[in-house]
Image (spheres, coloured by chain):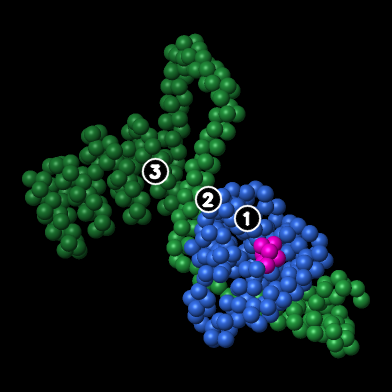
Chain colours: A blue, B green
Amino acid sequence: MQDLTDNSLMLKVKKGDLDKLGLLYERHKNKLFGFFYNLGNNPSVSEDLVQNVFVRMLQYRSSFSGNGAFGAWMFRMARNVNYDYHKKAAKTEVSSSSSNIEIRDPMNDELNEGIETEGNNALLRRAMAQLSEEKRELLILTKYKGLKFSELAEIIGCSEGAAKVRVHRALKELRGIFLELEIG
Amino acid sequence: MDKETFEIMVMDYLAGEMTVSDKDMFDTLLKENPEYQKTYLDLEASWHSIQKLNSPEPSKKMDDSFFNMLSKEVEKNQANTSKNIVDEWFGWFRPQFALGALLLLIGLGLGYFLSPKEEASTENNVVDIETEEVRQKLVLTLLEQPSANQRLQGVGEANKIAKVDEIVIKALLKTLNSDTNVNVRLAAVESLTNYVDNPLVRQGLVQAIPNQESPIMQITLANLMVALQEKASIEPFKQLLKEQELDTTVKKKIKNSIESII
């Protein structure tokens, strides 16, 4: 079973057994897609970004030491991919992520949800869009089960305590924006 | 309690990263401080709505392009690995390899021109003759053994002798005529077929025909005689046909063989 952990699979990829990346892809593709999508990218861009993360994993596989959690390493890479994409998109005047959030039709996104929940989701997305990119990213990362605060801290490059405080404050800000939008 | 400590505690509580005792302590704190409780409840609602935030499923196109990319990388990696091995090998050994090859060629050339050819070939001949003699003795000894396996081994050794002498041929013919084991007799026939140009062998094979009682031996010899077109075998076959106990299939085979030889 030890051979099947994310870390051991990535170490095998590092040693040249590239096929094992397929297993990691199957395990994490939905998480990564959700990460990019919830950050405000449209589905097609989110899919491209997922692909870019795995391309980067292959490119930088030698930098994986196996000491930290694979999830932290992966999301750190995902953040960089997202950042690079938007930097490039801004230069070429491609529509920004925040505008995507606002124009996206919630009805297409949450087909299985009740109408009330759909409304809340749409409102929540609008509130999220008004947060700074850093805070939005932080809150999206807390969604992923298995990612502890210590790993979240590793991803964003701060202490565990600081990560908790930052998430707490981002949540509080989101709550404020959400209520304003609800009243308005 | 300062603000930051409370914020950290809330996050631990929400993320389920709190120990049971800390959790109890936090519950008490909330009960005793309505203001903390309100802050907590507000955050809890936001926390849960984020956890419930869902996203659509990625399309199959994403899988296709990923696996295309991966298979290309795997191919590229394999090509690089084999190229690296070759490069490494030649990179390390190129000067040594060239020098080694040159020295080998010089050595071979010198060895070829300086070797005392005739003496060596004479020595080799002597060794070959000695080996043949030893092998012939071995054959004779093995054919005398009580174990059928060893006798079979003796016949096998006889096959390795390039030029057999009369003693070995006689020993093989004796085996063909009198060995108790049919497998040994069959092996002896097979061995003797290597020397059918020798009249002694052909004569011995013909003479062995009436001595055979095993149907398989009778058929083998009939086939051999047909192949050799040995007319001298017709008479012994005719004698064999007169025997009452002869198997009907064998009888038919011998009749056909006689017709083929005539």
The residue lying furthest to the bottom in this view is B31
Helix, strand or loop for disc 1: helix
Seen at 40% across and 48% down, the residue is B152
User: Mainly helix, strand or loop, the magenta region?
Assistant: helix
Residue A92 placed where, x, y %?
A: 53, 50
Which residue is labeled 3 in the image?
B156
Q: Is residue A141 visible?
A: no
In the depicted structure, whether residue A132 falls above or below residue B161: below
Distance from label 3 to label 2 (Cα)?
A: 86 Å
Foreground residue among B41 and A47: B41
Helix, strand or loop for disc 2: loop
Residue bounds of the magenta highlight: A131-137
Seen at 67% across and 58% down, the residue is A76
1 or 3: mark nearer the eye: 1
Q: Is residue A96 visible?
A: yes
In the depicted structure, whether residue B90 falls above or below residue A138: above
Seen at 60% across and 52% down, the residue is A87
**In the rendering, which numbered label is found on residue A92?**
2
Quadrant in which the N terminus of chain B appears: bottom right
Residue B206 placed where, x, y %?
A: 21, 44
The chain containing the residue under callout 2 comes to A
Q: Earlier in the sequence, mark 1 or mark 2?
A: 1
Foreground residue among B201 and B119: B119
* Residue type of the residue flagged with mark 3: Gly
Foreground residue among B102 and B193: B102
The chain containing the residue under callout 1 comes to A
Quadrant in which the C terminus of chain B appears: top left
Which residue is labeled 1 in the image?
A83
Distance from label 1 to label 2 (Cα)?
A: 14 Å
